[in-house]
Structures are given as C-alpha cells and as structure tokens.
C-alpha cells in the first residue's frame, strides 16, 4: 500500500514538472515572437523614415525692380520731334503705334520685342471693352511698352464740348489704370486736333502731349507693306505730295494698328537702323513735372 502511494506521489511530481516546463517553453516562445515582432516594427519604421523625404521648401521669389532709365530727351512742342537734353545721341527716332489694340497690336509688340525696339502704343477705349482686349493690352504693357492715351472713342476734340473732351481723355486714363495699374504718360489727340482745353487737361493728368513728324500708313497709296516700308525708311511719300525726305534726327514716326503696317514693321526698324538711327526708349523722354 505504501509502495503504491509512493509511486503515485512520484508520478504527480513528474506531471507537475512537465506542465511547468510546457508553460515555460510556451512563455519562451511568446517572448521570442514578441521580440521578433518588435524588431520587425522597428525595421519598418526605419524603412519608412528612409522613404519619406522632407518636403521641398520653395524659394521666395523676389521681384526685380525695373531698371531706371536716365531722362535724356524731350518732345519739342512746336515740331513734335525728339530733342536730346544734353549729350544724348541725336540719331534717334521715336516709334508710335496708334489705334491699338485692334487686330495687330500684339503681333506688332512681339515683332518690336524681338528686335529690341521700343515704342509707345496709343490706345482707344473702344478697343478695350472685352476681357480679351484688356488681356492683350496687359500683355503689351508687361512686355515693356508704355501705353499712351488716344481718347476713348477717337472723336475730333475740336468738334465736341469740353465736358465730352474730359470724358474722352480722363475716362480712358481711368480704364487703362484699371487694366495695367498705371495711368498713361503720353497723350495724342485723334487727327492731331488738340484744343487749348485738351492740352491743359492732358498736362493736368500728367501726360506729355505729342503729335508726329511724319507717317504714311493711313494714305491709300501706302496701304501696302513694301511701299510703306520704303516710305517710312526714306521719309519720302511722293504719291501723297511729299517728294522730299522728312526723316531727320529725332523724327516722331506715326504708325497704326493695321495689317500692312504690321507686315512692314520689321523692315522699317531694320531699314532705319541701317541708316544709322536707333529707336529712342520712351522711358528716356522727359515727362510732365520731371526736370
């Protein structure tokens, strides 16, 4: 009897020992799995850190200030030519484009830009009534060309009241400023028909008044690119009773937003340069209240 009890006791002890070993093995396995999981997670975090890049910080764009141009010329109010103020070159001409921006102004601006030739674009308000037309004007201005006032509807100022003249001039200045953020600094009356009132008003608005010394593209015989180019380069218009040359230092050249003028423009610029003339930068022309 005692022997049986002893055997049973030994068996129970062995059984308990086996259970404890099993639990220990199981705990050990769990610990190993836990360590492995933690290691994998750490490795994944490292991989993620390697893959994720720091976001690029955009450099702040600094707008360049426009280069200042020395004032070297003035407009002669009797001859409308460009005169040097001091030691500036006399061998210059001023290019001007009237009745813009109709159909060709942007093309003409691009041609001039490609030739590095400056010009004033004199605009009319009735060509600035749509968003597309306003966008064209803004693009011309952004290309570096000054915008001049040629009145709102191109009326002959000598045939309308002072109140209407004011609407034609100031109304257009307001519109141009709304589009490009700057009021015009040059004024040209339609047909060159200034009045005492319009002249004083233009000056009060801070604009230089100017007409021109010659131009041919509004005469029927010169509504042809080749003939026009020859006339503008030589200064001669024999088919409109100008058999002599009007091309002189400081000439103020009148052109318009027209198909034939746009087609002749590059030849006109290169032809004048071949004759020794350069296109004066309007920024170098003395403005109202400048000295």
Image (cartoon, helix red, strand yellow):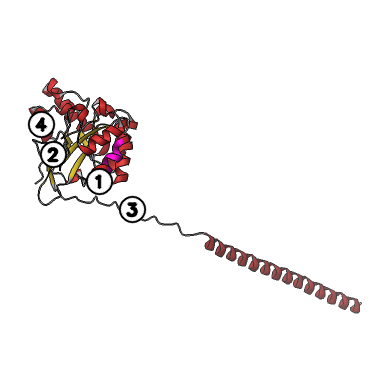
Q: Is residue 42 left or right of residue 288?
A: right
Residue 64, x across and y down, in percent: 27, 52
For the residues bearing labels 3 and 2, Cβ distance under 8 angstroms: no
Against 31, residue 10 (above or below) is below
> Which badge, 1 or 3, is on the more N-terminal residue?
3
Q: Is residue 18 left or right of residue 39?
A: right
> Which badge, 2 or 1, is on the more N-terminal residue?
2
Q: Tell me the quarter of the picture where residue 30 sits.
A: bottom right
Q: Tell me the quarter of the picture where residue 238 sits.
A: top left
Against 17, residue 46 (above or below) is above
Q: Which residue is labeled 4 in the image?
A: 199
Q: CA distance from mark 2 to mark 1?
A: 20 Å
Q: Residue at x 25, y 46 (%)?
A: 274
Q: Which residue is labeled 1 in the image?
A: 274
Q: CA distance from mark 3 to mark 2?
A: 41 Å
Q: CA distance from mark 1 to mark 4?
A: 36 Å
Q: Residue at x 10, y 27 (%)?
A: 195
Q: Is residue 72 left or right of residue 110?
A: left
Q: Residue at x 10, y 31 (%)?
A: 199
């Amino acid at each position: 009897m005692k022997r049986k009890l002893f055997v049973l006791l030994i068996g129970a002890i062995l059984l308990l020992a086996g259970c404890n070993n099993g639990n220990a093995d199981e705990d050990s396995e769990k610990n190993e799995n836990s360590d492995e999981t933690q290691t994998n997670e750490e490795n994944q975090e490292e991989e993620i850190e390697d893959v994720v890049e720091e976001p690029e910080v955009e450099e702040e764009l600094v707008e360049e200030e426009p280069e200042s141009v020395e004032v070297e010329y003035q407009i002669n109010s009797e001859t409308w030519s460009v005169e040097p103020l001091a030691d500036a070159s006399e061998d210059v001409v001023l290019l001007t484009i009237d009745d813009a921006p109709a159909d060709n102004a942007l093309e003409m601006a691009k041609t001039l830009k490609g030739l590095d030739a400056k010009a004033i674009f004199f605009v009319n308000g009735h060509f600035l009534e749509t968003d597309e037309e306003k966008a064209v004007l803004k693009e011309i201005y952004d290309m570096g060309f000054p915008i001049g006032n040629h009145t709102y509807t191109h009326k002959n100022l000598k045939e309308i009241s002072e109140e209407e003249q004011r609407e034609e001039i100031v109304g257009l200045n307001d519109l141009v400023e709304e589009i490009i953020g700057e009021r015009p600094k040059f004024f040209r009356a339609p047909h060159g028909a200034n009045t005492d009132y319009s002249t004083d008003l233009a000056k009060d608005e801070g604009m230089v008044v100017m007409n021109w010394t010659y131009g041919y593209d509004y005469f029927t015989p010169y509504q042809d690119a080749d003939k026009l180019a020859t006339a503008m380069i030589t200064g001669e218009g024999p088919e409109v009773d100008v058999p002599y040359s009007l091309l002189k230092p400081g000439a103020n050249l009148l052109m318009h937003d027209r198909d034939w003028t746009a087609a002749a423009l590059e030849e006109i610029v290169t032809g004048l340069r071949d004759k020794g003339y350069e296109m004066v930068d309007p920024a170098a022309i003395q403005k109202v209240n400048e000295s």
